[in-house]
Image: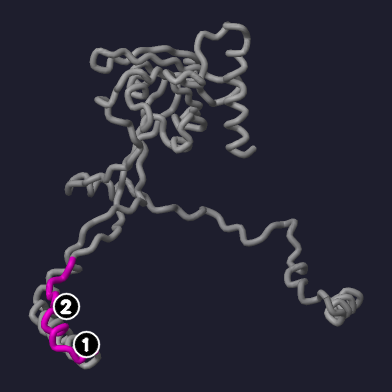
Amino acid sequence: MKLEFFQKKFWTASRQCAALDGKCSISCDDENINCYLIDNNGFVLVAEDYTLTGKFFGEAEGAVMSKLLQMGSFKRVTLYDYQALCWAFSESSDSGHTLLDPYFAFFSAVKWILTELVIFLVEFNLYSWWHSDLTAKAQRIGRSMQVPCDTEYPAFISERTIKENTGNVDCGGCIKSFVIQQIPSSNLFMVVVDNKCDCSMFEPITMDPIEILYNESLKCERLKMQKDRRRPDTCHPFHPEENSMECGGAVGLTPSLAATLLCVLLALFPR
């Protein structure tokens, strides 16, 4: 099922209740509320703002997600990535390059002189040579590079025993209310949030990884935890039901004469 079709089915189902002669007091078409469909890990599947699809619910509604964590509807766990890559700023590869700075400055000056000479011969104009913007840069510019590192990042899991919950968030004198309810026979939740209050004071909850900085003792403990993979105790080079005579049987395959003639005839006939 494509996502667009699934979203249309969801919005159609959400409007059916509003069409039953006032049995529903609110509707997702109301401008004062926002409706979300999230999974058990808090990722948005359907939202009125299509740019939120696939993002974490805490990025869109940080205040509501904080309240859900306090109420126990979601719990936070920490995951670790021991094969991550982090950006690091490297001014130079090693300190020995600083000894070559005078040579780099000399070569840059020679390059600048040759460039000016070529431009002068091409243009043959002393004015353009005098006001040229070309300059010699002997300074080595640093660059960013990715280095191996360890990171930790949060993950969120819904509490299976809580099927429905309501709550309020105090946003500086304005109360934001919300309702979360699990959809039967699925791992999805429908969240209805009142959007009349400005809760920008609450920072969004993200899942951005954080680099783990080790000191000397923690680094040693980390190396001790990294176990080498143990080889199997026994070797199994063959299986009793395997026939070794069948190996290499592809050499005995011969081309079909009818198929070969058919390919030649198709190649001869013009298209």
Q: Position of residue 64 (x, y in %)?
A: 36, 21
Query: Toward the viewer: 46 or 159?
Result: 46
Residue position for label 1: 119
Residue position for label 2: 134
Q: Is residue 77 above or below residue 90?
A: above
Residue 107, can we see it? no
**Is the C terminus in the top left, top right, bottom left or bottom right quadrant?**
bottom right
Q: Which mark is residue 178?
A: none
The answer to whether 102 appears left or right of 250 in the picture is left
> Is residue 137 one of those drawn in magenta?
yes
Q: Is residue 208 above or below residue 203?
A: below
Q: Is residue 251 above or below residue 43?
A: below
Measuring 49% from the left and 28% from the top, which residue is drawn there?
A: 38
Question: To which quarter of the image does residue 269 belong?
Answer: bottom right
Label 1, residues with CA under 10 Å away: few <14, some 14-19, many ≥20: some
Label 2, residues with CA under 10 Å away: few <14, some 14-19, many ≥20: few
| Residue type beneath disc 2 | Leu
Measuring 20% from the left and 86% from the top, which residue is drawn there?
A: 115
Q: Position of residue 67 (x, y in %)?
A: 34, 19
**Is the N terminus in the top left, top right, bottom left or bottom right quadrant?**
top right
Query: Toward the viewer: 72 or 101?
Result: 101
- Of mark 2 and mark 1, the one earlier in the sequence is 1
Q: Are marks 2 and 1 in contact (CB under 8 Å)?
A: yes
Residue 78, can we see it? yes
Question: To which quarter of the image does residue 106 belong?
Answer: bottom left
| Residue type beneath disc 1 | Ile
Q: Position of residue 59 (x, y in %)?
A: 36, 33
User: Could you tell me how far apart the alpha carbons at marks 2 and 1 are, in whole angstroms?
Assistant: 11 Å
Range covered by the magenta-colored residues? 123-141
Measuring 29% from the left and 58% from the top, which residue is drawn there?
A: 147
